[in-house]
Amino acid sequence: MLGFIKSQFFATLPKPTTDCTGKTIIVTGSNTGLGKEAARHFVQLGASTVILAVRSTEKGEAAKKDIESTTGKRNVVQVWSLDMSSYKSVQDFAARVEKELSRLDIALLNAGIATGKYVLAEQDESTITVNVVSTFLLSLLLLPKLKETAAKFNIRPNLTITSSEVHFWSTFREKSAPEGKLFEKMSEDNPETMQNRYELSKLLEVFAIRAMADIKSASQIPVTINTVNPGLCHS
């Protein structure tokens, strides 16, 4: 807790300064909060294309207008539809990336939910579906384009998932589920475990990223794959 307080109130993050000239960047969950501010920074850093991947294109267009007004840059931000509660939407988005983009330098998968309410999506509890399954489905579907970009332009693209240090707070009671029944256990309508569901989803993100790194080390794959902890923020 002391470390959390120190990092929240006594540390200031430096603004990014890396030149993004010519780069194509995707930011999911970018019509508000962290995603919107990340997209704004990428535009300020000179990116040629910044795609706001959002569930509500109307809100995405409003975010685009705001980013353009504050940066003074036009014809950079695009709004693409992406509903992380639908696997079909994730697959359609990835297919569009493959078809329409000549390169993909950064994929910042920031979209997530923390409702605390029990809702099913794609037969799993929605927090798990959106924050974990769809996030890594999209990650794996975007990897070919990221690897293609690495080879074509001799660079090292980034695949980054917005996680959180609250994964430390997960009780993960569902881990006692019988072999092969973990997702079934996590999809039960249990008010007690739902209170800790967001924290669990962030823990599973860390596990999945570590598993990807174990399968392919940094020297074996031309894409940097990682998570970031933004800390508590207004979002």
Image (tube, rainbow, N blue to C red):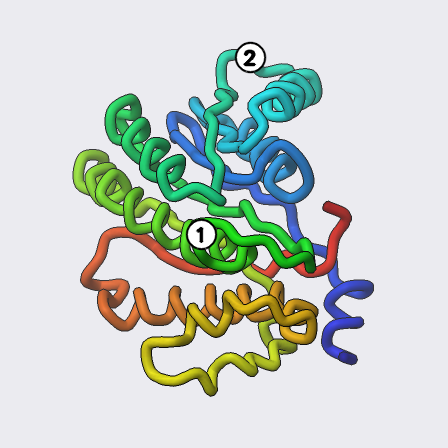
The residue most toward the front is 189
Residue type at mark 2: give it.
Arg
Q: Quadrant of residue 89?
A: top left
The residue most toward the top is 74
Compared to 91, does 176 lie above or below?
Answer: below
* Residue 94 position within the rendered picture, expressed as x and y whole percent measured from the top left: 32, 35
The answer to whether any part of residue 230 appears in the image is: yes
Left or right: residue 134 versus residue 165 is left
Judging by the rendered image, the residue that carries numbered circle 2 is 74
In which quadrant will I find the C terminus?
Answer: top right
* Residue 79 position within the rendered picture, expressed as x and y whole percent measured from the top left: 50, 22
Q: Quadrant of residue 43?
A: top right
Q: In the drawing, what numbered circle is on residue 133?
A: none
Left or right: residue 199 versus residue 84 is right
Q: In the drawing, what numbered circle is on residue 160?
A: 1
Left or right: residue 171 versus residue 206 is right
